[in-house]
């Protein structure tokens, strides 16, 4: 009997599941249209499979078992392909945006489906970030929201963030060339942040909510992340994931 394999399986079983995750997959994907024009951005084929499948596999590896997908533009393609999520070891539910609501508006639209605490992932972010340390950091500070933050790797980074010595976010600007720290598009948060958001007009987490929120903290990580929402990012993610599979 392979005792090491049995021990590894036992450790996984004893590791608590993480709370549900919300994937924001309703965007129009206009920046990616030159390469992907017949499907929603989150269904763009990356290394031989829809990008959302890579995200779902990453969430499953991180002990997430329930996922809410906020869908909009050509969202029926996402629902038809993923179904109830059982083949990925997940339970999937869907929230529709019948008109574009932005990242915050999409969460407000899904409010009735949201638990008290949950994770949020942008539908165009690839990363290998371990989620449990992010969640534990979020709880250790009793934060309203905790953002996964990484050092900027290029001069045109977006999501510029400034922190104090306790990793409290003191400034959040969505676009700022020359930024040192940037948002990875992954958050731990709760219904409290979402309940005050209106669905009467499009609303952005990055532009309309985070810059004015208190109790916002950052979890610093050097994990790789790639925004597939641009042609350069899409091609970079495809190349990276193909190399991983060699």
Image (cartoon, helix red, strand yellow):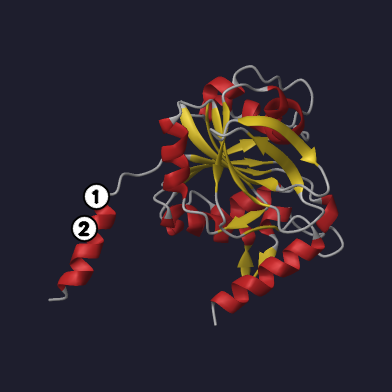
**Viewed as shown, does residue 26 lie left or right of 138?**
right
Quadrant position of residue 38: bottom right
Q: Is residue 139 visible?
A: yes
**Viewed as shown, does residue 178 lie left or right of 1?**
right
Percent across and percent down for residue 87 are 44, 59
Residue labelled with disc 1: 14
Percent across and percent down for residue 180 are 71, 48
Q: Is residue 48 visible?
A: no
In which quadrant is the C terminus drawn?
bottom right
Quadrant position of residue 108: top right
Q: Residue furthest right?
A: 34
Vertically, is 53 above or below 242?
above
Q: Which residue is drawn at 65% across and 49% down?
A: 123
Q: Residue 10 carries which label?
A: 2
Percent across and percent down for residue 237 are 67, 66
Cβ atoms under marks 1 and 2 closer than 8 Å: yes
Vertically, is 162 above or below 33?
above
Element on which disc 1 rests: helix
| Label 1 crowd (10 A; few <14 / some 14-19 / many >=20) | few
């Amino acid at each position: 009997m392979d005792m090491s394999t049995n021990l590894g399986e036992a450790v996984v079983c004893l590791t608590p599941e993480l709370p549900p995750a919300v994937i924001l997959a309703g965007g129009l994907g206009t920046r990616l249209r030159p390469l992907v024009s017949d499907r929603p951005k989150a269904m763009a084929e990356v290394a031989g499979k829809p990008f959302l499948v890579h995200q779902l596999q990453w969430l499953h590896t991180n002990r997430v078992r329930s996922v809410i997908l906020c869908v909009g533009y050509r969202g029926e393609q996402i629902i038809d392909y993923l179904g109830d999520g059982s083949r990925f070891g997940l339970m999937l539910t869907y929230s529709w945006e019948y008109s574009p609501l932005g990242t915050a508006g999409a969460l407000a639209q899904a409010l009735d489906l949201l638990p008290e605490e949950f994770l949020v992932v942008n539908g165009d972010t690839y990363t290998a970030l371990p989620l449990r340390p992010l969640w534990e950091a979020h709880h250790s500070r009793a934060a309203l929201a905790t953002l996964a933050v990484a050092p900027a790797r290029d001069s045109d980074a977006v999501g510029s963030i400034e922190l104090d010595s306790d990793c409290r976010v003191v400034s959040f600007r969505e676009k700022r060339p020359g930024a040192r720290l940037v948002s990875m598009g992954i958050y731990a948060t709760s219904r409290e942040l979402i309940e005050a958001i209106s669905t009467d007009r499009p609303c952005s987490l990055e532009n309309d909510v985070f810059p004015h929120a208190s109790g916002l903290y950052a979890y610093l990580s050097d994990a790789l992340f790639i925004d597939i929402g641009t042609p350069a990012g899409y091609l970079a993610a495809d190349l990276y994931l193909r190399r991983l599979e060699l």
